[in-house]
Image (cartoon, coloured by chain):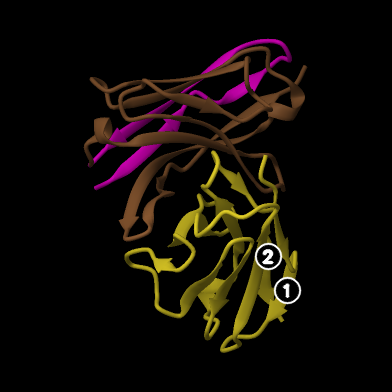
Amino acid sequence: QVQLVESGGGVVQPGRSLRLSCAASGFTFSSYAMHWVRQAPGKGLEWVAVISYDGSNKYYADSVKGRFTISRDNSKNTLYLQMNSLRAEDTAVYYCARGRNYYDSSGQYDAFDIWGQGTMVTVSS
Amino acid sequence: DIQMTQSPSSLSASVGDRVTITCRASQSISSYLNWYQQKPGKAPKLLIYAASSLQSGVPSRFSGSGSGTDFTLTISSLQPEDFATYYCQQSYSTFTFGPGTKVDIK
């Protein structure tokens, strides 16, 4: 079945790095844009980054720009998030999500139709 | 950047009630608006895309409307499994989520 499984979360000290992975199965991974979304404890959802289906285009939230890097390996059906210079405010559950394009007479619309179960990242000394 | 607001931030309702949640964008986003449902400890689930299109498999009691800056999610008859937090999201310029509306049991 269509599935996304995140891994790589854990406890890390401020200023250190961590790499998250998201393994995709059940669909043609290389045909879809992919996103990272995070949720701090007790808080709402925050979009983090997106990468196009072929990896040629990447966009980031201002809060992570210059510190986080999104990448993908279509041969391994895997999405990554390299997180550097981590801060306490990066503490959150990190979800990967599939970006789906929907079309009608008015244009193309993007939404996140498949989500992983999330992986927790805690930044603390 | 486009900012999203939702009202109310929380509401209490009973099974069978009609529930309406409002989402407002800081600038016009046409129909680039999605709605998600999230239950505690679970990943979000896509309900509505393009402001009013029902995602496959989502019950027809959910509906969305609006365009420009003002949008609405309506649950026509609240069911026990609908108690959750609902988020709107704009996809007009990158992506921004609203702060969420928690629907709990009266």
Q: Is residue A56 left or right of residue B73?
A: left
Work out whether disc 1 and disc 2 sit on a shared chain: yes
Residue B24 image position (x, y, % from top left): 68, 61
Q: Does residue A14 belong to the magenta stretch?
A: yes
**What residue would you read off at disc 1?**
B11
B40 or A104: which is nearer to us?
A104
Residue type of the residue flagged with mark 1: Leu
Check disc 2 and give the amino acid type. Lys
The residue lying at 51 percent from left, 47 percent from top is B91
Which chain is painted in brown?
A
Vertical arrangement, residue B36 with respect to residue A35, above or below? below
In this view, A13 is above or below B4:
above
Q: Bounds of the magenta span?
A: A1-26
Q: Quadrant of the N terminus of chain B?
A: top right
Q: Are marks 1 and 2 in contact (CB under 8 Å)?
A: yes
Q: Position of residue B76 (x, y in %)?
A: 52, 84
Q: Badge 2, how many Cα within 10 Å: few under 14, some, many 20+?
A: many
Mark 1 vs 2, N-terminal side: 1
According to the picture, the residue beneath numbered tag 2 turns out to be B102
What residue is at 76 percent from the left and 25 percent from the top?
A88
The answer to which image quadrant residue B83 occupies is bottom right
